[in-house]
Image (cartoon, rainbow, N blue to C red):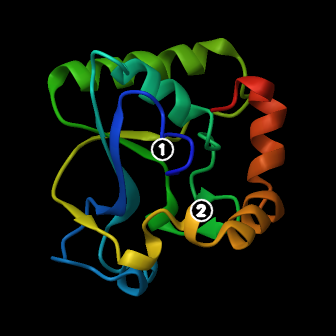
Amino acid sequence: MVKPFDEQPGIIKVVSGYTGGHKENPTYEEVCSDKTGHYEAVQITFDPTLFSYERLLEIYWQQIDPTDEGGQFYDRGSSYQTAIFYHNEDQKQAAEKSKKKLEESGIFRKPIATKILQAGVFFPAEDYHQHFYKKNPLRYKSYHTGSGREAFTKKYWGERNG
């Protein structure tokens, strides 16, 4: 989820990590065990004068299968479920509006399962998870293609993806 946002004008920083759970400083293995209640997430710091929150939402929707309640592509379990975490009422309203717009668009036949949740404490992931697509480009590309994510996003978003 880092690559689509990384290096765009107005994006200051994208950090991979975990949020929404009950354990302090969880590890990747603990989060994947589905016992900590965390989601895998990215925290995006952006300049709203150059990159709007609405644009963040638009790009986000184009990276996921918002109808999948059980995870994303090959990644299964609660830590891989999709969610938008808001930090204030304006973000909450924008997220709900974008979700409703997607629901009403008719792009997807199944209901949108992505949750909109209040942001809590964010724990950065281990260093090897940060900018994985740059550190491991072949593995990243192989997974992106092999998991079905690339075909899915092309099917639904075409050249608009990202």
Q: Going 68% across and 66% down the picture, which residue do you hit?
A: 137
Percent of width and height locating residue 46:
30, 33
Q: Quick check: marks 1 and 2 in contact, CB under 8 Å?
A: yes
Percent of width and height locating residue 67:
62, 41
Assess disc 2: are there few (<14), some (14-19) or many (≥20) residues with their C-alpha within 10 Å of its C-alpha: some
Percent of width and height locating residue 111:
61, 33
Whichever of callouts 1 and 2 sits on the residue coming sooner in the sequence is 1
Percent of width and height locating residue 23:
19, 77
Q: In the rendered picture of this protein, how many numbered marks are placed on residues?
A: 2
Hey, what amino acid is under mark 2? Tyr
Q: Which residue is mark 1?
A: 6
Q: Nearer the viewer, residue 65 or 112?
A: 65
User: In the image, is 32 to the left or to the right of 120?
Assistant: right
User: In the image, is 22 to the left or to the right of 152?
Assistant: left
Q: Tell me where residue 132 sits by quadrant.
A: bottom right
Question: Which disc, if any, is residue 133?
Answer: 2
Secondary structure found at label 1: loop
**Distance of mark 1 from mark 2, alpha carbons?**
10 Å
* Above-or-below relation of 157 to 19: above
